[in-house]
Image (cartoon, rainbow, N blue to C red):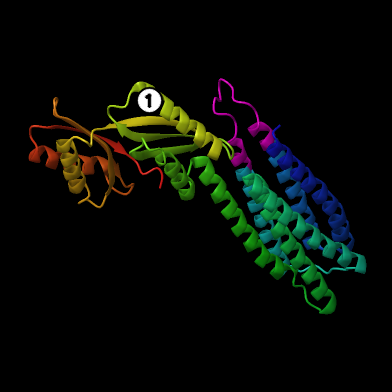
Amino acid sequence: MTDREKKIVRTSFLGIGVNLVLVAFKAAVGFLSGSIAVVLDAVNNLSDALSSVITIVGTRIAGRAPDKKHPYGHGRVEYLTGVLVAVLVLFAGAVSLKESAEKIFFPVETDYTPWSFLILGTAVLVKFFLGRYVKKTGQKLQSQALTASGADAFFDAILSLGTLAAAVISVLFPIAPEGYFGLVISFFILKSGFSMLSEALVSVIGERADADLTRAIKEKVASYPEVMGVYDLTLHNYGPTRIIGSVHIELQDDTTAKEIHALTRRISAEIYQTFGIVLTVGIYASNRSLPESEELREEVEALAMEREEILEIHGFYFEPESKNVTFDLVVNFKADAEAVRDELLQKLREKHPDLHFYTVLDSDYSD
């Protein structure tokens, strides 16, 4: 196990231990006082312990080395554990909502002792600090499951506080507010659960790379004097700590294979050392020093930029001998990319019938 995985497992075991202790004390208070709210609070803590178990299992699976069937590793399993924890939170919220509604229509008489208040008050503080610690650790380690568990623990602290407040009010006044407190808290738990689930599913499906990260990578690559442009940066996330990507750089067309080899190796090595990202570097040849090529490039770019759907053209290359013109076209996701490309090519061919235009459609994968 890596140091990161050890910290996640250690934090999860802490959560399991604390939650099991709270389950025992709260269950005792709930059954002795006749409070269904406290019993449900204990059950909720039991689900928290289960979520910590899921986090441990998910972390161990995610930490397995790549194999023939899974050459990119098992890191995305962590995102699936985040989904499972979010589902547990939603389940707890739904149960709390149901029981709270029943308590409003069918209130139950309770009998609390000073020891009950002491245990409930201590549980609020313990869950608050546990949630804060687990969530902070999860964010630091980029563990969605751990972060979700921490957020869940924090909401459990609020739930326990509501239960405690309802207990105090029921002792001081001849009313049963448990159901109303539980109803409000249930909605907060459900909202938190949906937020966790949305974040976890986005990671499973795949999301746009962080803009600050992509800008930093492009700036680093562009800092090499031989590089005339940086394009087509794509990053694929195979877990919180494993990112593989590719990028194209524009080089003068008389650059030798030996020079290209040395340059791309240096770039890949520096990106890995700086960002921990395995980056494959491809090239576009450029002959901007050729006046007719640069003039044609500016003309094509000006014509393309008349369409707001077109974000960029790059990889432009004009071969005077063969009359071939090649370039890549980046179109925004809302547009019909093929239709936009065909219209642009038609205009170019009408304007330059002696030239052969070829273009490749690119997507706006990064900033």
Whether residue 313 is visible, yes or no, is: yes
Q: Position of residue 173 (x, y in %)?
A: 81, 79
Q: Label 1, on which residue?
A: 259
Whether residue 238 is visible, yes or no, is: no
Q: Is residue 108 above or below residue 270?
A: below
**Residue at 13% across, 25% down:** 321
Q: In the current view of this chain or complex, which residue is farthest to the front?
A: 225
Q: Secondary structure at mark 1?
A: helix
Name the one closer to the observer, 49 or 163: 49
Graded by Cα atoms within 10 Å as few (under 14), some (14 to 19) or many (20 or more), the crowding at tag 1 reads few
Q: In the current view of this chain or complex, which residue is farthest to the bottom?
A: 173
**Which residue type does callout 1 highlight?**
Glu
Q: Position of residue 233 (x, y in %)?
A: 41, 39
Residue 26: quarter of image: bottom right
Magenta residue span = 58-81
Name the one closer to the observer, 287 or 218: 287
Residue 363: quarter of image: top left
Q: Position of residue 44 (x, y in %)?
A: 74, 53
Report the side of 15 relative to 343 (left or right). right
Report the side of 216 relative to 127 (left or right). left
**Residue at 71% across, 56% down:** 132
Residue 119: quarter of image: bottom right
Judge whether residue 222 is colored magenta.
no
